[in-house]
Image (spheres, rainbow, N blue to C red):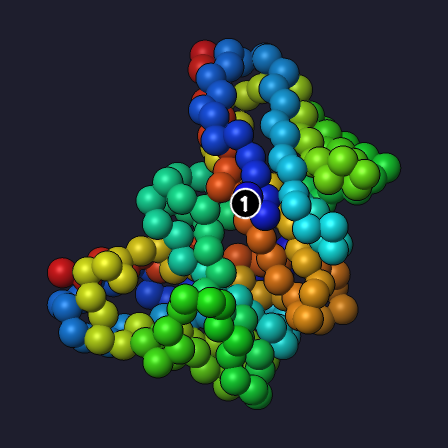
Amino acid sequence: RKEVEQDPGPFNVPEGATVAFNCTYSNSASQSFFWYRQDCRKEPKLLMSVYSSGNEDGRFTAQLNRASQYISLLIRDSKLSDSATYLCVVNLLTGGFKTIFGAGTRLFVKA
Amino acid sequence: GAVVSQHPSRVICKSGTSVKIECRSLDFQATTMFWYRQFPKQSLMLMATSNEGSKATYEQGVEKDKFLINHASLTLSTLTVTSAHPEDSSFYICSAREEGRGETQYFGPGTRLLVL
């Protein structure tokens, strides 16, 4: 079982749609959680951190459920520029700091 | 946000040569830097953790004699791919954490290596 699992997609949605991505992690020692965005042939860029209380940044909402070891990202009112791969990222602190990346979920937003 | 640079952005080399990639934190001191590799349509895979002033910690399956890491200062880590082969062709990305600034990692723009 992968340490961080994501649906690879692709998700094909029209502009203005709401789309949700899910991610599960297997290590209960996971300490912090993030969503990154990666455009084709570019480096990942931090989109937002994820907390149990949930957090919102404009059209993006992230949620963490520690009991279920589940992380979500909701994008409202999708824009063409949202097309990218979204990476679920988990930091572990077990004998040292380690970051585990999910394989990513590809999103295509179409006009 | 914090800035991390990488150089070169792209390199093409012949099989058997060595390639050095530099990773610099431009506006903060990074006691820890990370080196990742990403093959097409795959996730980033951590290769090693680079610690300033000490030896790097390599992930299982990564040859430390082939991928030499040096973290000589708080703003610079280098990765040298020795005797590169075509299967080493990949996208190499570094990241850095700023001590005391949480667990956010800031990524360099990546280096695309093609070994002929």
> Could you tell me if residue B115 is visible in this image?
yes
Residue A41, horizontal then vertical, whole percent:
37, 44
Taking the spot 40% from the left edge, 69% from the top edge, the residue there is: B62
Residue A37, horizontal then vertical, whole percent:
54, 40
Query: Which quadrant, please, contains the N terminus of chain A?
Result: top right
Q: Is residue A57 above or below residue B1?
A: above
Q: Is residue B96 above or below residue B53?
A: above
Residue A31, horizontal then vertical, whole percent:
75, 54
Q: Amino acid at mark 1?
A: Lys
Q: Output the chain of dot 1.
A: A
Taking the spot 71% from the left edge, 36% from the top edge, the residue there is: A70
Taking the spot 27% from the left edge, 62% from the top edge, the residue there is: B88
Of residues B9 and B85, which is closer to you in this image?
B85
Query: Which quadrant, please, contains the C terminus of chain A?
Result: top left
Q: Which residue is mark 1?
A: A2
Residue B4, horizontal then vertical, whole percent:
52, 63
